[in-house]
Amino acid sequence: MGVLGGMGPLAGATFAARLVQLTPVTADQAHIPVLLRNDPRIPDRSANRLSDGPSPLPAMIEGMQDLQRWGADCVVIPCNTAHLWFAQLRDSVSVPVLHIVDSVIQDLQRNGIHDGPVGVMGTPATIQLGLYQDALRAAGYEPLTDPDNVIRDLSMQSIAAVKSNQDALAFAPAAEAVGRLTDLGARAVILGCTELPLAIPPVRRNEFSVVISDSIDALARAVLDAFSRPASASQAAG
Amino acid sequence: MGVLGGMGPLAGATFAARLVQLTPVTADQAHIPVLLRNDPRIPDRSANRLSDGPSPLPAMIEGMQDLQRWGADCVVIPCNTAHLWFAQLRDSVSVPVLHIVDSVIQDLQRNGIHDGPVGVMGTPATIQLGLYQDALRAAGYEPLTDPDNVIRDLSMQSIAAVKSNQDALAFAPAAEAVGRLTDLGARAVILGCTELPLAIPPVRRNEFSVVISDSIDALARAVLDAFSRPASASQAAG
């Protein structure tokens, strides 16, 4: 299993750790072999999509091809914003690539949420470009985002705190955003940036009255599904 | 920076995460690029040293050489027991390899512990074969281990709980071992197996009256030192 990490590096490492923690085995040797390319030098994804920053695409493609050359037979990308380039990344390699948005929708269904309003948190680029909204509508959900940019600003405060290793400061703004989306009627809230699950860690999810769908854990569960039922991997990559 | 992980896989992923968390920067792009080969199929290290299990050495050498071939210009191994084969692993590649025991001794000194009794926790193989004890004596410390095997047994209970993803069960036995070593006069206690820092996570270290030297964090700090002062990397590998 190849992991194109570095976006950010803590999300990449946390994905590798959560994959181990969510695997129901006791012996080291029973875990899925992982190759994590946690190179943070990939140019900023949001800065490119929303202003005039350099494109991250060449560096991301180089990473995908490295992972394939090093023997990965399936690749995941624990960065939601990077999925704005998903088609190009998938087409740059011949091995299957799991899509993080598909994984989150599977996670909603696993949690019994099959329709209705679902809140989306994420970077301004993913929200503005509709990464989750289009897929949610296609799957029968009603995406709730941000009429007044408050949730966007709270999400960004929280993401910036995680990227500065100030997890204690990251919780409050993220929790406020979840609360506002809940007040708007959300049945579930998607932590649609891989820094946000670090702001609201798994042990604190029970403080909320809605289902929290964590894009890191959702992607890890999709990997476990793909490896336990190999036939589904190529389908998920389609 | 290449990381030979998988021993266990959670220790490998946690090392990658702690390296990010201990790096004092705010932008993704300023972090150290890491390549984590988290392949857990390496045969059990203790089982080989203490009974008749297959040797992990060929699989470890393959991993070291993979990392070098993939571009790592320095390698670390976040598994204490694997360091029983350190000379062979270091000699299998031409790039520098940092030694986890050197990193822990630097960590003791960073914490103001320059001599006196120091408790050692770890796998039976590392304790029985003296991985830490010899280096501590050479550096002027008095290693405290385990006259009656109680600390060994508590350590193993805790390590087994971490490897089963039952972190809640891992704390109590590890904490009892730290307490017993403190009662024996230890000025510091070394968590000399990379599962043990997961049993006593950083947020709970202040519950103890002695310095806790965490072999995962110590190795991460040694990497940060090596990358900020490149000249020290090859020395540390010597």
Image (cartoon, coloured by chain):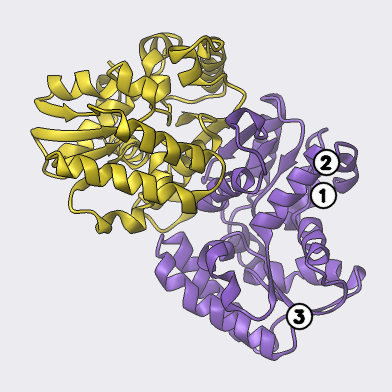
Chain colours: A purple, B yellow
B97 is higher (above) or lower (below) than B29: above
Whether residue A220 is visible to the viewer of this picture, yes or no, is yes
Q: Residue B221: x percent and y percent?
A: 31, 40
Circles 3 and 1 on the same subunit: yes
Q: Residue A46: x percent and y percent?
A: 61, 63
Q: Residue B41: x percent and y percent?
A: 62, 24
- Residue receiving disc 1: A87
Chain letter, disc 2 residue:
A
**Crowd rating for badge 2 (residues with CA inside 10 Å; few <14, some 14–19, many 20+):** few
Please name the amino acid that badge 1 sits on: Ala
Q: Nearer the viewer, mark 3 or mark 2?
A: 3
Circles 3 and 2 on the same subunit: yes
At horizontal 38% and vertical 50% (from top left) the residue drawn is B172
C-alpha span from label 3 to label 2: 35 Å
Q: Residue B2: x percent and y percent?
A: 48, 29
Please name the amino acid that badge 2 sits on: Asp
Which residue occupies the foreground of this view, A193 or B157?
B157
A6 is higher (above) or lower (below) than B230: below
C-alpha span from label 2 to label 1: 6 Å
**Crowd rating for badge 3 (residues with CA inside 10 Å; few <14, some 14–19, many 20+):** many
Q: Are marks 2 and 1 in contact (CB under 8 Å)?
A: yes
Left or right: B144 as drawn, with respect to B221: left
- Residue receiving disc 3: A187
Left or right: B139 as drawn, with respect to B233: left
